[in-house]
Image: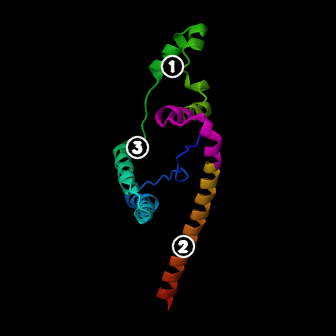
């Protein structure tokens, strides 16, 4: 696990198939917290930046949406045929068979590379980042529970108003 040192919230992803529930999730999960954080930033004389960041994230999400919501099928017959024609020595040298591919190791290396080379975070901050990650995880869990209770309370209020 290679959490980010400068993370301000627990990273998570929700898959939503339809546009309207997706937009509701974006507003509740991105834009509303951004507005709150920016309002707090203005109150403590800091420049607001979360709204602008959320708009960039939303723009990027909309750009990659076709690649995330559609199923893509590719034929690998040529690659498999080429792999089977390689000698054992060459197969060990050029490891591109997906049968033996270690996705877990790949993802750990991927996250480590993003942390080191894209975000320029030093490994000396890794232990502090892990502690902060655990704290953000529990904050996220508590907020999910609070949100669920708020939704249930609103539903209960609506039903009591309708029934009386």
Question: Residue under circle 1?
Answer: 80
- Of callouts 3 and 2, which one flags the residue occurring earlier in the amino acid sequence? 3
Residue 25: give x, y in percent of width and height.
44, 60
Magenta segment boundaries in residue numbering:
111-131
Horizontal arrangement in the rendering, residue 78 relative to residue 128 (left or right): left
Residue closest to the eye, 162 or 109:
109
Horizontal arrangement in the rendering, residue 4 relative to residue 35 (left or right): right
**Secondary-structure class at tag 1:** helix
- Badge 2: residue crowd in 10 Å (few <14, some 14–19, many ≥20): few
- Of callouts 2 and 1, which one flags the residue occurring earlier in the amino acid sequence? 1
**Secondary-structure class at tag 2:** helix
Q: Give above or below for 49 relative to 42.
A: above
Does the magenta-highlighted stretch encompass residue 123? Answer: yes
User: Which residue is found at the position 59% from the left and 25% from the top?
Assistant: 99
Residue 81: give x, y in percent of width and height.
49, 16
Q: Give above or below for 141 relative to 159.
A: above
Q: Give above or below for 4 relative to 118.
A: below
Q: Residue furthest front?
A: 45
Residue 35: give x, y in percent of width and height.
40, 63
Between marks 2 and 1 in the image, the one whose residue lies nearer the viewer: 2
User: Which residue is found at the position 51% from the left and 19% from the top?
Assistant: 80
Q: Which quadrant of the figure contains the N terminus?
A: top right
Q: Which image quarter: residue 147?
A: bottom right
Residue closest to the eye, 57 or 95:
57
Question: Residue under circle 2?
Answer: 150
Between marks 3 and 2 in the image, the one whose residue lies nearer the viewer: 2
Question: Residue under circle 3?
Answer: 70
Residue 1 shows in this picture? no
User: Which residue is found at the position 51% from the left and 82% from the top?
Assistant: 157
**Secondary-structure class at tag 3:** loop
């Amino acid at each position: 696990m290679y959490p980010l040192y400068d993370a301000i919230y627990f990273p998570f992803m929700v898959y939503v198939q339809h546009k309207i529930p997706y937009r509701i999730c974006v507003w509740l999960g991105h834009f509303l917290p951004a507005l709150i954080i920016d309002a707090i930033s203005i109150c403590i004389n800091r420049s607001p930046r979360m709204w602008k960041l959320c708009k960039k994230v939303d723009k990027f999400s909309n750009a990659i949406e076709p690649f995330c919501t559609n199923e893509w099928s590719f034929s690998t017959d040529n690659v498999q045929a080429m792999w089977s024609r390689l000698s054992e020595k060459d197969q060990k040298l050029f490891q591109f068979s997906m049968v033996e591919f270690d996705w877990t190791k790949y993802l750990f290396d991927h996250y480590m590379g993003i942390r080191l080379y894209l975000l320029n975070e030093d490994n000396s901050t890794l232990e502090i980042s892990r502690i902060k990650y655990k704290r953000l995880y529990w904050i996220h869990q508590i907020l999910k529970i609070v949100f669920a209770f708020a939704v249930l309370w609103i539903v209960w209020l609506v039903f009591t108003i309708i029934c009386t």
